[in-house]
Amino acid sequence: MSRVVSVQDSRTILVEFAGRRSVVVLTGVAVVAADEASAADFLRRMLAGAWVLVEDGEVYRSPDALYINGEMIRHAWRTAPNMRYLGQFDPGPRTSAATAAPRKAKPVSTPARPRSRSARRARR
């Protein structure tokens, strides 16, 4: 895991790992010159002070494992500008069915049994 130090442009970030700084160029990302400023700003918002996993130019943000290259390829900076990362969702510990509180059993109604012919005749 590396810490993002800065975003240089819409395709290049500077990361620090074990005290060494390295320049990482995002692979597969091509941004039109007209969108360069907004794309770089979007990348800064996504990676400001974040931890990332870098594998041969492929960048994944931690802890949500967001594929940064994919976000830049699909032009995500063109969406609503007020969207932002709010943090990791933690629903709490999961409980299994064995440890969960037992549920009350619902009463089961039995279907009415058809009467025999002799019982129906005697009733008449």
Image (cartoon, rainbow, N blue to C red):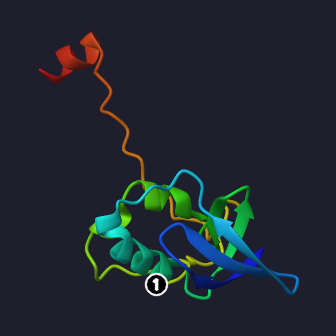
- The quadrant of the image that shows the C terminus is top left
Can you name the residue that lies furthest to the top here? 117
Note whether 109 is above or below 60 in the view shown: above
Q: Which residue is mark 1?
A: 86
Can you name the residue that lies furthest to the right here? 18
Q: For this view, does 120 lie left or right of residue 29?
A: left
Note whether 80 is above or below 32 in the view shown: below
Is residue 95 in view from this perspective? no
> Mark 1 falls on what kind of element?
loop
Is residue 31 in view from this perspective? yes
Q: For this view, does 124 lie left or right of residue 80?
A: left
Note whether 116 is above or below 51 in the view shown: above
Q: What x and y, as percent, mark residue 117?
A: 25, 11
Q: For this view, does 70 lie left or right of residue 34?
A: right
Residue closer to the observer: 102 or 55: 55
Can you name the residue that lies furthest to the front here? 33
Q: Residue at x 68, y 73 (%)?
A: 52
Note whether 124 is above or below 31 in the view shown: above
Q: Residue at x 51, y 64 (%)?
A: 104
